[in-house]
Image (cartoon, rainbow, N blue to C red):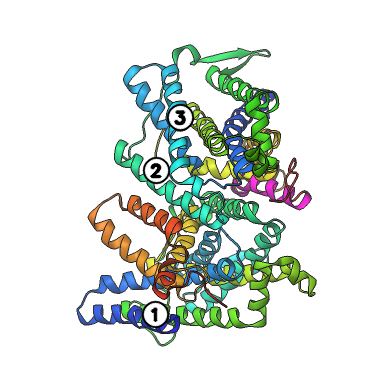
Amino acid sequence: MIRENVLNAGILLAFAAVPLWALWADEPFTITLATRAAILALAAVGLNIALGIGGLVSLGHAAFFGLGGYAMGILAHHAQTYAPLEIGPLTIAGTKSMPVIWITALVASALVAWVIGKLSLRTTGVYFIMITLAFGQMLYYFAISWSAYGGEDGLSIYVRNGFPGLNTLVPIQFFGLTFAVLLAALVLFAALRSSPFGLALNAARQAPARVAAVGLDPARLKLVAFVISGAVTGLAGALYADLNRFVSPTMFSWQLSGELIVLIVIGGVGRLMGPVVGAALFVALEHWLGGLTEYWLIALGGILLGLVLFARGGVIGLLTGKAGPHV
Amino acid sequence: MSTILLIEQVLNGLQFGVMLFLMAAGLTLIFGVMGLINLAHGSLYMVGAFAAAAVAGVTGSFVLALAAALAAAALAGAVIEIAVIRRLYAAPHLDQVLATFALILIFSEGTRWLFGSFPLYLDIPDALSGPVTLPGGIEYPRYRLALIAIGIAVALGLWWLTARTRLGIRIRAGENDREMIAALGVDISRLYTLVFALGAALAGLAGALVGAIQSVQVGMGEPVLILAFVVIVIGGIGSIKGAFVGALLVGLTDTLGGLFLPALFRLFMAPDAATQTGAALASMAIYILMGLVLVWRPAGLFGTRAA
C-alpha cells in the first residue's frame, strides 16, 4: 500500500509528464486530451469542495460550468463583433482577455450558486439532489431559448482568448496555463480542508446538530462551501469553452453534472487528488474505449456499478488501502 | 386571446400533467417505501416506449403494444431491482445516484445498440385518431383526451390499491416501519421487488402512451424524469396525492406559461423583445414555481417530512 502523499505527488508528476512526452513525440492531440482532462479535473475539484468536504450531492454543477462557458462566450462574442454589450444604461465592451473573463466567470457563478444554494439548502438529502438537478435543467432550457446568444446552436469564438505573456494557441502553453490553474485550485482545496472553516464544514456533514450546539450555523457553512464550489466549477467552464472555442447549451446538460460526480467517485470522494485521477482515467477511457467501440458508455456503466458495489473509496482508496479520507 | 385556444391549452396542460403523474407516482412510491432515489426511472420509460414501438411494428396492434410496454418495463424493473438496486437501499444517496446513473448509461447505449440511433414511430390506433368535437364547438384530438382519461383512471386505481387492498396496507406499513412489518412476517424483499416493478410498469405505460404523440428515441426518458423530480419536490416526497396535484400544476404551468408570458410582456415591451423574453421565462416557469413552493413549504405541498 502506498502513502497518500507519495501517491499524490506521483499523480501530479505523471499528469505533467504526459503532455511533455507528447510535445517531444510531436503528438499535439495528446496535449489537447491532457488539457481537457486538466479542465474537467478543475471542475470536479470545485464540486469536491461541496461533495467531498460538505457532503452536498449536487447534481446540478453543470449550471456553473455552463455559466462560466457563457461568460467567456458572451464577452468574446461582443469583442469579435465589435458590438458593446448593453444592459440598460450600462455599456460594457467585450473582451478577449482571459483574466477578465475568468473574474467574470467566477463572480457570475458564485452569485448564481448563492441563489441556488440559498433555495436548495432549505432541504437536505434526496430533495437537495433533485432540486439542484432541476435548477441545472432550468438554465439549460434558458440557454436554449435565449436566441440572442445562439440559442440551441451555441456560439463559436474564432480565436482563443489571450493571456498576458503567453501564446494560448500553442497547445503546450495553453496546457501549462490550465495546469497552473488546476494546481492553484488544488492548493485552495487543501487549504480549505484543513482550515477552521473546512473542519467545521466537515463536522457539519457528519453531525449538524452538534455543530449547531457549539454555536456554528451548519446551513451557513454549507452555503459558503456551495458558493466557492460553484465559482471554481464556473472557472473551469470558462477554460473549457476556450479549449473548444465554442459554447452551447450542452455545457449545462444534466449528463455533465452526472459525469462530474462520476469523476470524483472514480478517484475517491473527498480526496485531494480524487478528481484529478478520475478526470485522467475518464478521458483516457473515453479515448481508448471510444476508439474500440461506439458503445463504450456501456463499459463505463459497468465499471461504475463495480466501483459503487465493490470498491467504495475509488482508485485512491484501492491504492492506499484506506476506504475513506481522513481530514 | 380566444377562449377556444385557452381551453385547448388547458387540456394540453392536463394531458401533459397526467403523463407526468404516471412517472412521478412510481418515483414517489419507490422513494416512499424504499428510500431510494432512482435516476434510471427515465430509462424504464424509454424501455416501455421501445417495447411498444417494436411490438406495434410487428403485430400492428396498439393494445398488444401497450401490454408489451407494461410487461417489458415491469420485467426490466424487477431485474435491475434484484441485480443492483436492492444492494443500495442502505447505501448513502451518493451511491444510489451513481449506480442508477450507471444504469442509465447501460440502458441508453444498450437500446442504441439494439435499435440504432434513428427514432422509431408509434402510430395512434385508428379508433382513437382524429379530432373529437367538445361542447362549445372545440375540436380536440381524441387520443389526447384518451390520455387524460387513462391518467385519471390510473390515479384512481393507485388510490384504490394503496387505500383499499392488502398490498396497499403493506406498502404503507413499509413506508412507516420496515423492520416491524418484516418482523410481522411480510416478505419484505419480495414486497420491494413488487413495488419497484409496479413503478417501472407505470413509467413504461407513460413511455408507450407519449411515444405515440412524440418520437420514440434514446434519451427520451431523462427530460421527463427531471420534470417528474420537479413534480415530486412540489408535491412532497412519498405522497401520491402530492404527485397528482404537483403533476397537474407543472403541466398547466408549462403550457399556460408558454401562452401567457409572451402576451404579458407584449403589454409593456416591443413585440420582438417581448416574444424572446417571454419564451425564455416560459421555459423557466416550472422551476420558478418549484422555487416558490420551496420557499413557502420546504417539504412540498403534501410532504410530511423533510427527507
Question: Mark number for residue B107?
Answer: 2
Task: Please name the amino acid that badge 1 sits on.
Answer: Ile
Residues beneath discs 3 and 1 located on the same chain:
no
Q: Chain of mark 1?
A: A
Q: Position of residue B209 (x, y in %)?
A: 49, 26
* Number of the label disc, if any, that sits on residue A2: 1
Q: Position of residue A176 (x, y in %)?
A: 38, 82
- How crowded is the residue under tag 1: few (<14 C-alpha within 10 Å), some, or many (20+)? few
Q: Residue at x 55, y 51 (%)?
A: A137
Badge number at residue A298: none
Residue B211, numbered label = 3
| Residue type indicated by callout 2 | Phe
Residue at x-position 57% and y-position 60%: A57
Say whether residue B55 is magenta.
Answer: no
- Give the mark toward the camera: 3 or 2: 2
**In magenta segment, residue B295:** yes
Q: CA distance from mark 1 to mark 2?
A: 37 Å
* Residue reaching furthest to the left: A25
Mark 3 belongs to chain: B
Would you say residue A91 is visible in this rendering? no
User: x and y percent of residue A326 in the render?
Assistant: 55, 76
Q: Are marks 1 and 2 in contact (CB under 8 Å)?
A: no
A22 vs B42: above or below: below
Tag 3: amino acid: Gly
Q: Which residues are magenta?
A: B276-296
Which residue lies at the image location 68% right of the left edge and 47% below the top edge?
B290
What secondary structure is marked by label 1? loop
Q: Is residue A257 left or right of residue B134?
A: left
Separation of disc 3 and disc 2 at Cα?
17 Å
Helix, strand or loop at mark 3: helix
